[in-house]
Amino acid sequence: MTMLGDRQQLAYIASQAADARVNVELETEGMTLNIGPQHPATHGTLRIIARLDGEQVLWAEPSCGYMHRGYEKLTEVRTFPQVTALINRIDWLGSFANEVPFILAAEQLMGIEAPPRAQWIRTILFELSRIANVSLFLGDLGVQLGAITPVFFAFRDREYVLNLIEGATGGRFHPNFDRIGGLKDDLPAGWIDETRAVMRKMRKFCDEIEGLLFGNEIFEARTRGIGVIPRDVALQYGLSGANLRGSGVDWDLRRDQKLPMAWDKIDWKVWTHPDGDSYARCWIRLQEVRESTFIVEKLLDSLPSGPVMAKVPRIIKVPEGEAWVATENPLGEMGYYVVSKGELGPFRVKIRSASFNNISIVPWLLKGVYVPDIITILASLYFILGDIDR
Amino acid sequence: MLGLIASIPYWAQSLLRVLGGIVAVLLPAGTIVYVFLFKMMSFMQSRLGPMEAGPFGSLQLFAEVGKWLQKEDLYPERADRFIFKIAPLIVLSSTFLLVAVVPFGPDAWFTNFEAGVFYALAVSSVSVLGILIAGWASANKYSLLGGLRAAGQLIAYELPMVLAVIGVVIQAGTMNLQQIVVAQNAGSIFGWDGLGNPYILTQFVGFVIFMIAVQAELTQTPFDMPIAESELVSGYMTEYSGFRFLIFFIGEFATAGVFALIASILFLGGWGVPFAWFGWTSIDSIDNWMNVVGPLIMFTKMMLLVFIIMWVRFSYPRFREDQLQRFAWKVLIPLSLVNIMATSVLKVAF
Amino acid sequence: MAKIPGLLKGLGVTLGTMVETVTKGANTVQYPHEKETPPIRARGVIALHEGNCTSCMLCARSCPDWCIYIEGHKELAPPRRAGGKPRQVNKLDRFDIDYALCMYCGICVEVCPFDALFWSPEYEYSEPRIADLLHDKAKLGEWMETVPEAPDLEAGAEKKGKK
Amino acid sequence: MSSLAEITAVLGDAVEESFEKGPEGNVDTWVRVKTSAWREVAETLREKLGYDYFCFLSAIDWMPSPYGRGEEDPTAEREPIDPTIRQGYAGGSTRMQVFARLVNHRTHHGLTLKADVPDDAMTIDSWVGVFAGANWHERETHEMFGINFAGHPDLRNMYLPTDFEGHPLRKDFPLLARIVKPWPGIVDVEPLPGGGDDEGGAE
C-alpha cells in the first residue's frame, strides 16, 4: 500500500509536468494523434484526439457519435413492447440487463408487479448477462495490455453463458424476453442443471484469468497507480459500477435500492477497492463475475414455483406519469426516465447509460499519462460504444 | 565430406552456400510458424488453429504466402517510396547475414569466422535500421512511434545481450562459434564428462539474460511495444501489406529461429553431443555422420528454445516503454556485469 | 512470501490449457463439417403456416421495423357444415418478411392470434445479395418443417396451454 | 433520509412545485425550481444535503408530436392531434424543461430536479462548475434540444456533424424513417368481387 502512495505521487507529478510544459515558452512542437475511430483498442468506433509530447499525453479528448442511433427519438414512435426489442441493443454484450430497468419503470407506472418466479428468473438472467459481459471484458483487458490468450478463454467460456441465455430466451444477444408484467415464458427443462455446471466453469475461468493476468507482475506494473480516480471526482462525474466501487464508494444499486427483483432475498457481497486505479477497477470486475456465479446458484436454490406472468391487458397502455428506474448493469448504473401520456408508446424516454458518464471523465484522466496508459485506462473504464452513443 | 566440397568449382560452392542459407532460414521459419504460431498458440487457447488447408492445416502457410503474393504492392501517398520499399529487405537481409556464421556440424558451416560471436552480434543489429526507416518512411504517426520505440528498445537490449555472451566467451576462451561448441561438448563438469559442459549450467544467469534480450530483440511479448497492436495498430508495419508485409513476417520468425540457433550454440552445446559418448577427443576425430545428425540436433534444440520464446509470448501482457527501458538499464545490465565479473574470477581461480 | 510468482503461474495456465486441448480436444467446432444444434427456442428464422393466416395484418402492424408485407383478397370457401352458407375467407396473396430489416424480436410470432407464425432454429440462409433476404410466402412456408415442438418446462413452472 | 420537507426547507423559495410518490422506504422525489436558481440549487443540494452524485441531465419537449408514430392508415380519417402542452410531475409552464437527477450516495435517496426553460431565450445556467460531469450531458442536451447553457465552456456537438441543422429530440423534428416509407400495416385485402360486405369474415 505504501508503494501505491509513491506511484500516485509520481502520477501527480507527471500530470503537473504535463501542465507546466504547455505553459513553458520554449515548447517543442507536439504531435496530434488520432486514436480511432477505427482502431483496435476502441471497442467499436470511439475516437480519441490526443496531443502528445513524445509519448506523454498533454491533452486528450474522446469524440463520440460515430454510432449514434438516436434511441431516445426512436422510442417515441414505438409501443412499449417494441421498445423492449430496441433497447437491448444499447449495451449489446449485456443485453438482457438493458431490458429490466425499462420494464420495471413501465410496471411501476402501471402499478403491477411481476410474480415471484418471474422476479427470480429475471434476476438470474440479469446476472448471467453480467457474467457474459464482464467475462468478455476480462479477456479483452488482456488484449489491450498485449496478452492475446485471455480473450480466447473469455470467448470460449462466454459461449456457455450465451448458450444458457439462448436456451431460455431464444436470443443469444438480444433476448427480448422481458414483458411488462413478467416474462415471455418459463425456463425449459434441464436448464437449471446446465446452469449450475456452467457456473462452475465460469469460476474456473476466473481462476485462469487471475493466474494469467491479475497475479502477473507485468500486469500489476501496467495497471497499479495508473488512472487514479479519487472518490469525490468519481461522484462528480457520475461514474458508476465497478468504476465507482474501485474508488472506494460502497454503493451497489442491487443492494441499496428496493426493486421487485430477487437480489435482496439472498446473501452476497459488494466488492470495493480503496485505490481507485486501473487495477482496482479490473479487480472488482473479476470479483463481481465470481460473486455473480454464486448469486445465480443461490437464486436457483431458492427458485419459487408459480406463474411467470401477471395479469396484464392484451393491449398495453401505460397510465400517465413519470418513472425513473435504474439498475446495476454490467457497465454500471443504467436507468430509464420514462414519461408516459397514457398512450401505446412512451412520450419521452431518457436513457441514462453507464458508459456515457464513465467516459466523460476521460479528458480529466488522460492528462499526463503515456500512450500505452491511454489504452489501459480506457480498457479499465470499460465502455461499450453502443452504451455511450445510444 | 570436406574433400567433396573442395572438389566442385567455386561458383558451385557459392551457389550451394546460398541455397543452404536460404534453406537454413526459411525451413526453420516455416516450421516455427506452423508448429508454434498456428498450432501451439491455438492449443494454448483451446482451439485447433487452421485445419482446412492440407492435413491438419499444414499447407496453411503456403496458402497465406500465396495470398500475400497476389496482393497489390501498396504504399502511402506521402511515403518516402524508395526507403519504404527497401526497409523490409534490410530486416530480412540481417537474418540471412546472421545465419552465415552458424555451424550446423563439424564440417557443415557456411563460413568459419574466428570472431563469429562478434560478427553475429554486430549483424543482428542491422535489422534495427530497417525497422527504424520503415517507421519513418511510412509517413504514419503510429509507424513513427513504433519505429522510434523499436530503435530505443533494440539498442537498450543489445547491450545486455553482448554482456551475457561475454561470459560464454570468457569461459570458452574463443569467439569462434565452432570452437565454443567444441569447448562445451569436449568439456567436463568436475571431471565428469557424461554431459560435456553445456554453458547453460555454468552460465545460467547469462542464459536467462540472453533469452530475455532475445525476446526483446525479436520484439515478442512482453517486449512487443514497437508493434503493440492495441496501441499502435501495428507499429512500424502498419502501412505494409502484400509481399512486403510477408517479408517482415518471415523476417520475424526466421530471426527467432536464427537467434534460437545462436543461443543453442552458446549455451546448449550446438550441433554436438558430448564427445565422451563416442570417445571423440577433438573436432578432427568426429565421425562424418555428425554432419547429417548435427543439423537435426541443432534443429531440435532450436525448437526447444523457440518453444520457450513463444510460450512466453502467448502468456504475458506487454510492458510499457519506460518500464522496459528501466528493466534493461537497471536490472539486466548490472546483472550481466556481475555475471561477467563472477565468470572471470572463477576462470582465473580454476 | 511463499507464493508462486505470477509470471510462472501464467505460463502454467497456458501450458495446462495446451495439454488439455491436446488430450481432451478443443472447445471449438469445425463448422462446415460439424454443426452445433441450436436450442429449441432459438430464434433463427420465422416460418409461416399459410393455411392459418387470415391476413389480419396484426403482425405487420406490430413489427417495429416495418419488415412484413402482406397482401390478400377475399374469397368464398365451402361451408363448414353441410347445408351452411359459403364462408368468406381472406386469402393470402403475398406474405414477405425482409430479413435484411428484421431484428428477430419475435413480436410478430407472439401477436399472431391464429398460430400462423412460428420460430425455427434454422440459421443457414445467408445470401450474397441483400435483396434475396426478402423471403416470400413459399420460402417462409418451407421453414415450417423445421419448426420443433416447444420444450418441456422446468420443474415449478405453472403449466399453461399452448405457447 | 432527506425528506421532501427538508429539501424544501433548505432550498427555500427557489422551489416552485414538488411531487412525491412511491411506497415507504422507496420514495422518489420531484422538485421543480426557479429557472434563475437552477445553479444555486445544485450547489446547495450538494453542499448542504449531501446530494453529491450526479446521475444525468437532460430535457423534455412537452409539445405533443405533430407527426404521431407514422403508423396511420392514410385511407382512414386521421384523428386530430391535441396540441395542448401538458407538463408532467411538478408542473411547469414552458414547452421545454430541463431535468436532472442527483443522488445522495450515503442515503441512496435520489431526487429529480426540473426547471422551466423560457421559450424565447432558451437559456439556462450551466452546472459544469458544480458537477464536472454535467459537461457532456449539457452538450448533448444542447444539440438535441437547442437549449443553451450559460457558462458552459464548450457547447460543441457531440454526436451530429457540426453543420447539422435542427434539434433531433424536439418533437417538431420529424423522424424521416417513418415518413419516407409507407407503413406496411395498411390493410391491403381486396374485397370480394361480388360485393360480400360482412366485416370480420376472417376466421
Image (cartoon, rainbow, N blue to C red):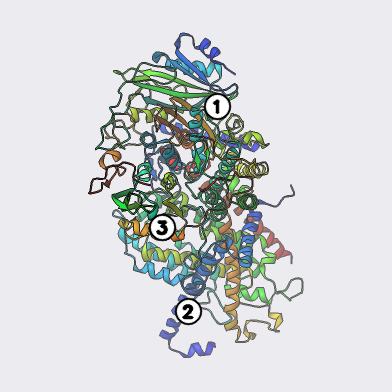
> Measured from the top left, where is residue A287 in percent x and y?
63, 42
Q: CA distance from mark 3 to mark 2?
A: 29 Å
Q: CA distance from mark 2 to mark 1?
A: 68 Å
Chain of the residue displaying label 2: B
Residue position marked by numbered label 1 in the rendering: A232
**Pointer 3 with pointer 2, Cβ within 8 A:** no
For residue B319, say whether it is visible. Answer: no
Residue B20 shows which numbered tag? 2
Badge 3 density bin: few <14, some 14–19, many ≥20, Cα 10 Å:
many
Disc 2 secondary structure class? helix
**Outermost residue toward the right?**
B191
What is the count of numbered marks?
Answer: 3
* Amino acid identity at mark 1: Asp
Badge 2 density bin: few <14, some 14–19, many ≥20, Cα 10 Å:
some
> Measured from the top left, where is residue B30 in percent x and y?
49, 71
* Amino acid identity at mark 3: Met
Disc 1 secondary structure class? helix
| Figure quadrant of residue A266 | top right
Residue position marked by numbered label 3 in the rendering: B237
Chain of the residue displaying label 1: A
Chain of the residue displaying label 3: B
